[in-house]
Image (cartoon, helix red, strand yellow):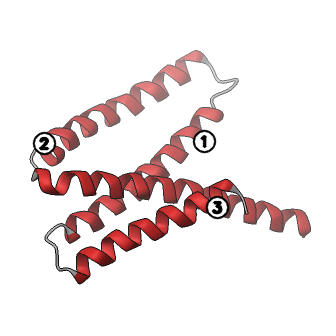
Amino acid sequence: MRKSDILMILSFVVAVGMIVKAFILDEEVKVFLLVFFAVGLGLALLRLFVNGAIKKMKGKDWKVKVLFFAVLLGFGLPFQSWFRKEVLFSMDRAYLVSSIIIMILGVLFMTTFFGYMMRKMNAKKLTV
């Protein structure tokens, strides 16, 4: 078993454990945990998309590269600023640490899960 597979399983188990614990104990943070886990999954997919797009930039004209990064920063920086100011800074401090932890677990899980699925799909292509 690869280290990435262990990380994927461990991050998923810890995230599900945190969410289940919050629901069993009827903690008020349970909704935030679900939302921030989904945000973490989305951030991982965005990261994978951007990394793939950057890899495809090799050999492109410099104007295309500048346009790509201008659009990326044009959307990313305002969203990041909004998320930080309106969501993170306005949250109750008691919820903040567990919400950030679950978001990081979501990023770790989805990144490793996507890699795992790509390995499985490539293995199927090689055997066919």
Badge 3, how many Cα within 10 Å: few under 14, some, many 20+? some
In the rendered image, residue 23, in percent from the top left (x then y), is placed at 24, 79
In the picture, measured across the screen, residue 70 lies left or right of residue 31, that is: right
What kind of element bears circle 2?
loop
What amino acid is labelled 1 in the image?
A: Gly
Q: Nearer the viewer, mark 3 or mark 2?
A: 3
Identify residue for label 1: 52
Q: Secondary structure at mark 3?
A: helix
The x and y percentages for residue 120 are 74, 65
Q: Which residue is mark 3?
A: 5
Structural distance between the alpha carbons of marks 3 and 2: 34 Å
Residue at 64% across, 61% down: 5
The N terminus lies in quadrant? bottom right
Q: CA distance from mark 2 to mark 1?
A: 32 Å
Q: Earlier in the sequence, mark 2 or mark 1?
A: 1
Q: Any mark on residue 89, and which?
A: 2
**Residue count near mark 2 (Cα–Cα under 10 Å), binned few <14, some 14–19, many ≥20:** few
